[in-house]
Amino acid sequence: MNYSWLGVLKAGLGGNQSWTPAWPDQEPREGYDVVIIGGGGHGLATAYYLARDFPGKKVAVLEKGYIGGGNTGRNTTIVRSNYLWDEAADLYEHALKLWEDLSEELDYNVMFSQRGVYNLGHSLQDMRDIERRVNANQLNGIDAEVVSTTELKQRIPIMETGAHTRYPVLGASFQPRGGVARHDAVAWGFARAAAARGVDIIQNCEVHALDIEAGRIRGLDTSRGYIRAGQVGSVAAGHSSVIAAMAGLRLPLESHPLQAFVSEPMKPVLHTVVMSNGVHGYVSQSDKGDLVIGAGIDSYSGYSQRGSPHLIDHAAAAILQLFPVFSRAKINRQWGGIVDVCPDACPIISPTPVEGLYFNCGWGTGGFKATPGSGHVFAHTIGQDSPHPLALPFHLDRFTTGALIDEHGAAGVAH
Ligand code: FAD
Ligand code: PYC
């Protein structure tokens, strides 16, 4: 292919007829060894690692809309691994290590930018929690430091930290290796690399029912017909409870809208990511220049990918208290996604009582950062029919044994 500007111009004017698609648009086959429900980042990553690590298996991803059109394409792309408890820290750090080589692994630029993530403290209790979490992170070999207000002001001069403000900033945790990535590129990169290894990516294919016989999965009824399946992995984020109900299972999940918005693009002004759990807001600046701002979840449960405007209003007001310099920026777009929230703010990565049926869900407001790690451990869990050691603590059993992993503090977004 000719990549000169003239070549690109000619191809564009000719309707890009000479370009090969990044992944083929597949018709469903009669059956597969493994079917993944959900073409978000996690589903596509699972398919990629299955194809890479279990090359004998024929794998398909079924997506009811277009790939990345769920939370993957709606999230605010913050990546970090500074979780409190060992089990969660290990899982998210595994993902962060994979992020560091992901563009190379996929031969696709996912624009992973390690610009650092600050989590602000606004009260003495916030600061005690931050110190505890930073200590725990350091013990787990995760880069983390406590930053004083004076230091913060030097690093982010446009941030209002003073004691007279509505949200005085008493300090922060900082993870230098945290940052952001380009969300669609993550979906596209995994799709392209998975397809290159023989995975069928089937869009506009909604799963309507699961065919279960004698306690074992046999196949799926879809909007494009019946598909046989030896194993099925559900990675459907906000719709996980809907899929579980098809198998007669009830998962400990609530689906809530989570909203975000972007400003008009502007010149580079904020070179890092700033989050505040207390204020219920966070902000970063995309490579395109828009301020990317989000809030806590809407308090009601539901499946509308919209949410209610007062949360956006609240988040904008809070961010403006911290960054009065943004007060004249215009809001360009607002949207919502549906997140599936677990009682302990940790995911479920687990086999189920139905043989051959597995769930990967419950990432709530924070699953984007886990995408490669989640896909990797879920692929192992399905491929070996046995949980990956990093996935074991996130087994469904924990809701009966009581071995919950409470990550509400580190989840970073209020729920
Ligand atoms: P999705 O991308 O939602 O993929 C699931 C797919 O399943 C969807 O494409 C859906 O169409 C498909 N599906 C559902 N039902 C069916 C069916 N019956 N048949 C076929 N397909 C089906 N996380 C972070 O780590 N950092 C952040 O900064 C961050 N910000 C966020 C901001 C917002 C506004 C939102 C909404 C979420 C945010 N998250 C963040 C959370 C993160 O987006 C999710 O945890 C993560 O993207 C989940 O990925 P996924 O691949 O599991 O889900
Ligand atoms: O989990 O870091 C996170 C996050 C930031 C915004 C939404 N989720």
Image (tube, grey):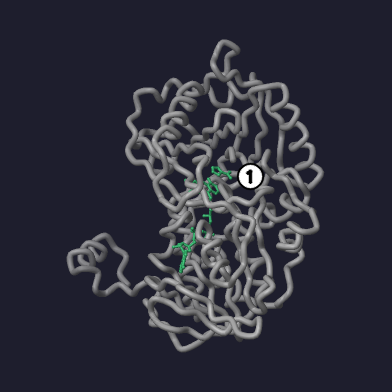
User: In this view, which residue lies farthest toward the left?
Assistant: 13
| Mark 1 neighbour class, 10 Å CA radius: few under 14, some 14 to 19, many 20 or more | many
Depth check, front residue: 85 or 98: 85
Q: Position of residue 372 (x, y in %)?
A: 59, 61
Q: Is residue 3 visible?
A: yes
Q: Quadrant of ligand 2?
A: top right
Q: Is mark 1 within 8 Å of ligand 2?
A: no
> Mark 1 belongs to which amino acid?
Arg
Q: Position of residue 145 (x, y in %)?
A: 71, 34
Quarter that holds the C terminus: top right
Quarter that holds the N terminus: bottom left
Q: Position of residue 165 (x, y in %)?
A: 54, 14
Locate residue 151 relative to residue 14 in the image: left or right.
right
Q: Is residue 264 above or below residue 338?
A: above
Q: What residue do we see at 50% from left, 78% from top?
A: 60
Q: What residue do we see at 49% from left, 59% from top?
A: 186
Across the whole image, how many numbered discs are drawn on residues?
A: 1
Q: Position of residue 253 (x, y in %)?
A: 60, 54
Locate residue 127 relative to residue 60 in the image: left or right.
right
Depth check, front residue: 69 or 283: 69
Q: Is residue 79 above or below residue 29?
A: above
Q: Is residue 284 above or below residue 254?
A: above
Q: What residue do we see at 37% from left, 33% from top?
A: 267
Image quadrant where residue 3 sits? bottom left
Residue with the mark numbered 1: 177
User: In this view, which residue lies farthest toward the top?
Assistant: 164
User: In this view, which residue lies farthest toward the bottom?
Assistant: 30
Q: What residue do we see at 57% from left, 34% from top?
A: 275
Q: Secondary structure at mark 1?
A: loop
Q: Is residue 368 visible?
A: no
Image quadrant where residue 99 sits? bottom right
Depth check, front residue: 97 or 317: 317
